[in-house]
Image: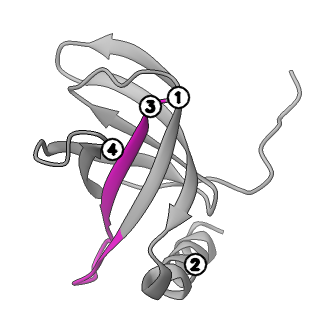
Amino acid sequence: MENKRRLIRIEVEDFLEIQPLNEVAKMFEGKAKDLSLIGVCFSSQVQWQKWQVLLIDYFLHNELDSVKLKVVVIWSEFIDSKNGYFCGGEIIEVEDKMQAKFANYYFQRLKQAL
């Protein structure tokens, strides 16, 4: 099978707060499993639909900041009742003032992994 990924994904365990784009009052927890500059895979107890747009507060590990991401769900798969759903999403927007910090976070984590 051909690997279609354009960037290296790094394994993470970062906390997420997830909101559906059209329901800003509802907030759900999730956990990032791997990350690149253009995508994130995460677990959630909520079933997200393919092509659904989510607003994600991505809490940077060992930082006091979070980065707001807009993500479109590419796939979602039920794992089990304990772990919920495993989802893959493409990052379509990163909060303007946090773009450099998010990129730096990714490259620092990549450096640690290598």
Is 101 on the left or on the right of 48, as rendered?
A: right
Image: magenta residue range: 52-67
Q: Amino acid at mark 2?
A: Ala
Q: Where does residue 17 sit, x and y in percent of width and height?
A: 22, 52
Residue, disc 3: 52
Q: Amino acid at mark 3?
A: Gln
Q: Give the residue drawn at x 55%, y 72%.
A: 106
Is 63 on the left or on the right of 90, as rendered?
A: left
Mark 4 vs 1: CB contact within 8 A? no
Check if residue 55 falls in the magenta segment. Answer: yes
Mark 3 vs 4: CB contact within 8 A? yes
Quadrant of the rendered structure where residue 67 is? bottom left
Mark 3 vs 2: CB contact within 8 A? no
Which numbered circle lies on residue 103?
2
Give the camera-side residue of 47 and 51. 51
Mark 1 vs 2: CB contact within 8 A? no
Residue, disc 4: 21
Check if residue 87 falls in the magenta segment. Answer: no
Q: Give the residue drawn at x 61%, y 70%.
A: 110
Identity of the residue furthest to the right in this view: 2
The N terminus, quarter of image: top right
The C terminus, quarter of image: bottom right
Which numbered circle lies on residue 51?
1
Q: Where does residue 28 sit, x and y in percent of width and height?
A: 16, 41
* Residue mark closest to the camera, 3 vs 2: 3
